[in-house]
Image (tube, rainbow, N blue to C red):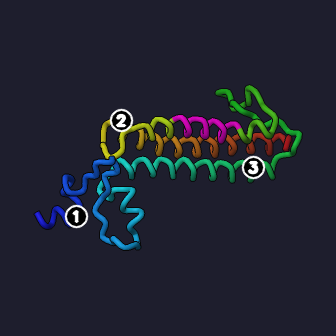
Amino acid sequence: MWIKSRLGLNWARNFDPCGSNRAWNPYPRGGYGALVDRVNPLDFSHFLLWTGDLCFVAGLILMTLISASAAAKINPGAHVPMQFGLNGQPTWAAPRRFALLFAPALAAGFGLLLTFFAHRLPNGQLTKEAVSLGTSRVFMAFTFVLAHMVHLAFALKWLNKDKRR
């Protein structure tokens, strides 16, 4: 019983009727107390929530840096291919600014939508919905960055081949 209460596993002792459900604080007079008061370190649902948030923010930053790097290599008046056919030729093109900001804007929209759904889940409960939302947010952030990199690599290759930069 003593070890359970010291590790914060005695939930009846730590339950706060006001609803905060504070975890056991090893630093009652400061130190890491504020973090431990807000998040139970044994709660995996918080880990999934914050990992998804971190991956989407990192993905958006990376996509912005990739777009800025590609913008330096493309003339301001050029049209960037947005879709390629099976023969390797572009089927349609868009102005440079739209083409470089389309994927980051799409990723931000999906990220905000999934973040809204993920933060509506009850805290402290590891459900199938929390696991699926957490893993899908990480996977989608990675997929958006990869798709943006591949698209810009093909577009720059085509622009360099035809000297249309």
Farthest residue to the front: give it.
18
Please name the predominant secondary structure of the magenta segment in the image: helix
User: Measured from the top left, where is residue 55 in percent x and y?
Assistant: 51, 50
**How far is the residue under mark 1 from the one under mark 2?**
27 Å
Secondary structure found at label 2: helix
| Quarter occupied by the C terminus | top right
Query: In the rendered structure, which disc, 3 or 2, sits on the residue that comes first in sequence?
Result: 3
Query: In the rendered structure, which disc, 1 or 3, sits on the residue that comes first in sequence?
Result: 1
Q: Which residue is denoted by mark 1 in the rendering?
A: 7
Q: Residue at x 55, y 40 (%)?
A: 111
Q: Which residue is denoted by mark 2 in the rendering?
A: 129
Q: Which residue is denoted by mark 3 in the rendering?
A: 70
User: Where is residue 8, by image quadrant?
Assistant: bottom left
Q: Which residues are magenta?
A: 102-113
Q: Residue at x 45, y 41 (%)?
A: 119
Q: Is residue 127 left or right of residue 119?
A: left
Question: The disc labelled 2 sits on which kind of residue?
Answer: Glu
Residue neighbourhood size for the residue with mark 3, other residues' Cα within 10 Å, grouped as few (<14), some (14–19), many (≥20):
some
| Quarter occupied by the N terminus | bottom left
Question: The disc labelled 1 sits on which kind of residue?
Answer: Leu
Q: From the viewer's perspective, is the residue at label 3 or at label 2 nearer?
A: 2
Q: Residue at x 50, y 40 (%)?
A: 115
User: Measured from the top left, where is residue 146 in percent x and y?
Assistant: 57, 45
Q: Which mark is residue 58?
A: none
Residue neighbourhood size for the residue with mark 1, other residues' Cα within 10 Å, grouped as few (<14), some (14–19), many (≥20):
few
Q: Is residue 20 left or right of residue 120?
A: left
Question: Does the segment drawn in magenta span residue 57?
Answer: no
Question: Does the segment drawn in magenta span residue 105?
Answer: yes
Q: Is residue 108 left or right of residue 48?
A: right
